[in-house]
Image (cartoon, rainbow, N blue to C red):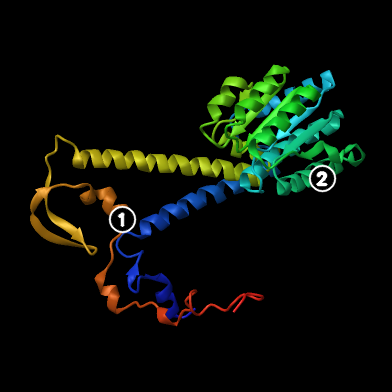
Amino acid sequence: MNISSLGSLLAEDNWQNQYTDTGAVGAIVTLILVAFILGNIYRATSHGKKGKELYIRRIAGLNAIDEAVGRATELGRPVVMVPGIATNVDAIVMQALKIFSYVARISANFNNPILVCCGGAPVYAVAQEIIRDVYQREGLGDRFDPDSVRFISDKQFALAAGVAGIILREKAAATFFMGDFFAESLIFAETANSVGAIQIASSTQVTQTPFFIAACDYVLIGDEFYAASAYLSRAPLLVGSLIGQDWAKMLVCALVLLGVLINSIQLGPFTGAQITKEKADSAWKDIPARNVKLSDTFTSHLFTPQDDPSLKDRIHRETYDKSDLPRPDTDATPAPGAGS
């Protein structure tokens, strides 16, 4: 990449450059956050080589998985798992299936039946492969029943009715509801509660979490759902990433509190501060005396970089003539088979 290409890359709207003035502050904060994550991954890896683990606080809902599966085994009744009502595979579904793979591993070793109920064909296909792989890794491939992973329906309340029927007919002893849930959440929870099942649930929809709290034994709230992979597997990469993200959150919270304190001092009702200089185009200019506004505060200047007009003559961005672009109504090539 030559200098002119680099200048074009840094330019915005032909001349603006986000790293003039205080724009570098955002990049520095981002690098610090990345350093927290990479540094903790290194710490977790180093501790793992010494046979030690970094501390992760206890999550009751995840600790109860062994108890729930053990009770199901004692009763000789199946474990039912639902990875939300999503019809397509996304990060939330994969996180739920990651938790279910741990549940399936324990159930496989206890020779306890499981039932995974899916609300979409792609979710069903991925879930079946994940559960089959769990049994094979445990050397129990002959125990895997393809019918233990079922596609119920991609319609919300048809799925709810189907899962509720399975829970009632099979008398499930333990149920796991993890992922995206909406109005059907209480249908699942009440049905499982009616048969005396131990319920461990988590919804990424905050409006549904209260219903799970009211009807389930254990609920993963907020980031506990996303922390489950690191908590259950204790893989150094996942544990280090989790702790690094916690450090990053604490730094962001500290910056927010510091910003509130600084703004309160500068804009507080008892200061009555006035200014005679205003920052414009990344330079200070004299103005008539006036009261301090939010845009005049230190934090506003720090995190709201301004443009340097001198760059207008030094950095240019390659442009194109929009008139050369095809217009869909006149220039578009007809699709094959389309009429003239």
Cα gap from disc 1 to disc 2, whole angstroms: 50 Å
**Amino acid beneath label 2:** Asp
Is residue 54 at least partly visible in the picture?
no
Label 1 sits on residue? 304
Q: Position of residue 212 (x, y in %)?
A: 59, 26
Residue 77 visible to an observer of this rendering: yes
Select label 1 or label 2 by which is in front: 2
Rendering quarter of residue 132: top right
Q: Which amino acid type corresponds to the residue marked 1 in the rendered image?
A: Thr
The residue labelled by disc 2 is 133
Q: Residues within 10 Å of mark 2 (few under 14, many from 20)?
A: some
Q: Position of residue 239 (x, y in %)?
A: 62, 41
Mark closer to the chain start, 1 or 2: 2
In the image, taking residue 202 as reference, residue 141 lies left or right, namely right
Farthest right residue in view: 142
Q: Which residue does the image show at 63% across and 44% down from the upper left?
A: 238
Q: Nearer the viewer, residue 325 or 68?
A: 325
